[in-house]
Image: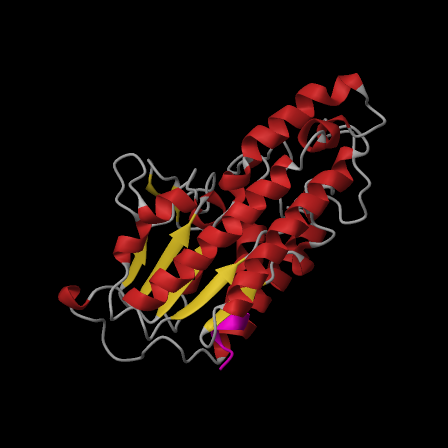
Amino acid sequence: MTHHSKRLSRMCRAAVVTAVAGAGLLPTAPAQAAGDGPNYVAMGDSYASGAGLSGVKDAECDRTTGSYPSLVAGTSAGKNRAFKDVTCSGATTHSIFNAQGTKPPQIDALTPNTKLVTLTIGGNDVGFTGVLATCVLVRSSDPGGSPCKKHFTTGKDVLGERINTVEGRVRDTITETRRRSPDAKIVVVGYPSLFPDNGVGCAEVAFARGDFAFLRDTTLKLNRALARRAAAGGTGVSYADTYAPTIGHDMCQPRSRRFIESLTPAAGSLAAHPNGFGQLLMAAAAYDQILKP
C-alpha cells in the first residue's frame, strides 16, 4: 500500500470515527429481545450489501462485513444492538415488497421496534448493469461521440422514464416503512460518484468519449429523485449524499485514489461498485444524517 493510499485510509476512517463520536440515535440499553424485532434494518441493493468485498455474510445476496450498514452497525453506537441486514445484490424496488429468489420481501424485516432504517435502491431499476454493458458495446460505432446516450434517448428518454418510476416506488417504500415502523429514522443513502464529475473519461473504461457525461448525468438524476423523495417524506426522513464526498475518486482515477472500482476491478472488489474506501465514505455520509435531529 502506498503512502498516499495509507493517508486516504486514515482520512476515511477518521471521517467515520468523527461522525460516530456523538451518535445517540440507537439505544444504549441492552439488545432487544428477539420477539421485539430489529432496532436497525438495512434495505437496498449491492451498493448497500457491500458486494464484492471480503467477509461474505450471505453468498446469495453478496452481503459482506465491509458494507456501509455493517460499518454503521459495528460502531460503538450500534454494536450489540439488534441489527437486521436484508440488503441484496440485484435488488430493485420490486424486491422491497416481493421475494427475491429465496429471500422474503425486504420490507418484512421492519417492526414497530425498528428505530433506524437505511435504504439504497434504484440503480437496478434503471438497469445499471445493462446500461454499462450497452455503453461498452456501442462505443465502436462512435468513439468520440455519445452513442450510448443516443441509444437510450432516441425517441424517448428511456432512463429518465425509469427514474421517474423509481421515484414513485421509493415514495411508496418510505410511506410503508413509516407505517410499519412509526418511530424509525429513515436515511435514504444515495449513489456515489461513479464517473468523472467533469465528464472527461479515461482509456481504462471503454465508453465513448461523450458517454461519460451522459452516465454522470444519469447518476445525478437518480440521486436527485431519491433526495426529493426523502425531502418529501417528512420528519425523520433524510437523504445522505454520497456523491459529493466521492468526487475525484471515481472509476477513472488512479487505483490509489479510487473509491469506485473500474470495469477491471482490483482483487477483492466488484466492477463499478464501491471498494472498501467507498463503503467507509458511504457509512460516514449515512452517519452524518443519523446524528442530525
The residue lying toward the viewer, choosing from 142 and 82, is 142
Q: Position of residue 217 (x, y in %)?
A: 71, 46
Give the side of residue 15 with respect to residue 140, left or right: left
Question: Quarter-wise, where is residue 223 in the image?
Answer: bottom right
Name the residue: 41% across, 57% down. Answer: 172
In this rendering, the count of numbered labels is 0
Please, is residue 71 above or below residue 290 in the view?
Answer: above
The residue lying toward the viewer, choosing from 97 and 84, is 97
Q: How is the image coloured?
A: secondary structure
Magenta-drawn segment:
288-293
Please, is residue 161 above or below residue 142 in the view?
Answer: below
Name the residue: 55% across, 32% down. Answer: 129
Q: Look at the image and say whether residue 226 sits in the magenta stretch.
A: no
Q: Position of residue 154 (x, y in %)?
A: 72, 29
Give the side of residue 117 with respect to residue 232, left or right: left
Residue positioned most to the front: 155
* Residue 55 visible in image: no
Q: Position of residue 187 (x, y in %)?
A: 47, 65
Name the residue: 25% across, 71% down. Answer: 113
The residue lying toward the viewer, choosing from 109 and 201, is 109
Residue positioned most to the right: 144
* Residue 279 visible in image: yes
Give the side of residue 36 with respect to residue 250, left or right: left
Q: Position of residue 130 (x, y in %)?
A: 56, 29
Give the side of residue 189 with respect to residue 141, left or right: left
